[in-house]
Amino acid sequence: MIESILEKANVEYELIKQDKPILSAMDAEGYYPVEKSAPTFVLDTDKGLVGCITSLQNGRLDFNSMKTEFGFEKLKMADRKKIKKETGYEVGSIPLVGLGLPCLFDKKLLNHDQVYGGTGDEYLTLKIAPQDLMKVNDIIGVFE
């Protein structure tokens, strides 16, 4: 599914196979530059679930400022069970592409030529230019 989305958008990408699961950025050491990790979180808002593609260099997300910036009354990490039920993905395997949710995007990712993140399969990593990542997702807001 992820490949068909990327092919249809005509973007360059690479799928990297690993022999061990990558469930967090720290698991990625040795496979790709960890500082270029782009984890995708699922947030629970008053407007429904929202994806959040962020830079590992961002540290903790500031939910209070994000609520104000994007006009949410409620904003928090979504519950694992709700994520699985509504997206079909397990926490740790959330894909960068094909999540089917509107997404917030961390502007810091644009400082990299390529970023790395989930595909829905913990043994497969997506390498993609951050500009292309924005192109293939429904980006509803950009934050720093």
Image (tube, helix red, strand yellow):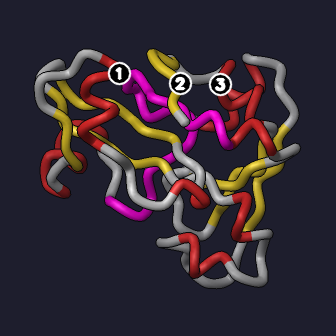
User: Residue visible at 23% across and 49% down?
Assistant: 77
Q: Main secondary structure of the magenta part?
A: loop
Mark nearest the camera among 1 and 3 is 1
Instruction: Give whichever of discs 3 and 2 has the lower sequence position.
Output: 3
Q: Which image quarter is the N terminus in?
A: top right
Describe the element under mark 2 as helix, strand or loop. Answer: strand
Image height of 100 relative to 122, above or below: above
Q: Does residue 113 belong to the magenta stretch?
A: no
Describe the element under mark 3 as helix, strand or loop. Answer: helix
Q: Does residue 103 belong to the magenta stretch?
A: yes
- Alpha-carbon span between mark 3 and mark 2: 10 Å
Q: Is residue 124 left or right of residue 48?
A: right
Instruction: Give whichever of discs 1 and 2 has the lower sequence position.
Output: 1
- Check disc 3: other Cα within 10 Å, few if <14, some if 14-19, many if 20+: some
> Which sits in the foreground, 80 or 45?
45
Image height of 125 relative to 4, above or below: below
- For disc 1, the marked residue is 69
Callout 1, which amino acid? Glu
- For disc 3, the marked residue is 134
Which image quadrant for residue 44? top left
Instruction: Give whichever of discs 1 and 3 has the lower sequence position.
Output: 1
- For disc 2, the marked residue is 142
User: Residue visible at 30% across and 39% down?
Assistant: 87
Q: Is residue 58 left or right of residue 62?
A: right
Horizontal and vertical percent for residue 120? 49, 52
Describe the element under mark 1 as helix, strand or loop. Answer: helix
Which image quadrant for residue 5? top right
Q: Is residue 66 left or right of residue 46?
A: right
- Check disc 1: other Cα within 10 Å, few if <14, some if 14-19, many if 20+: few
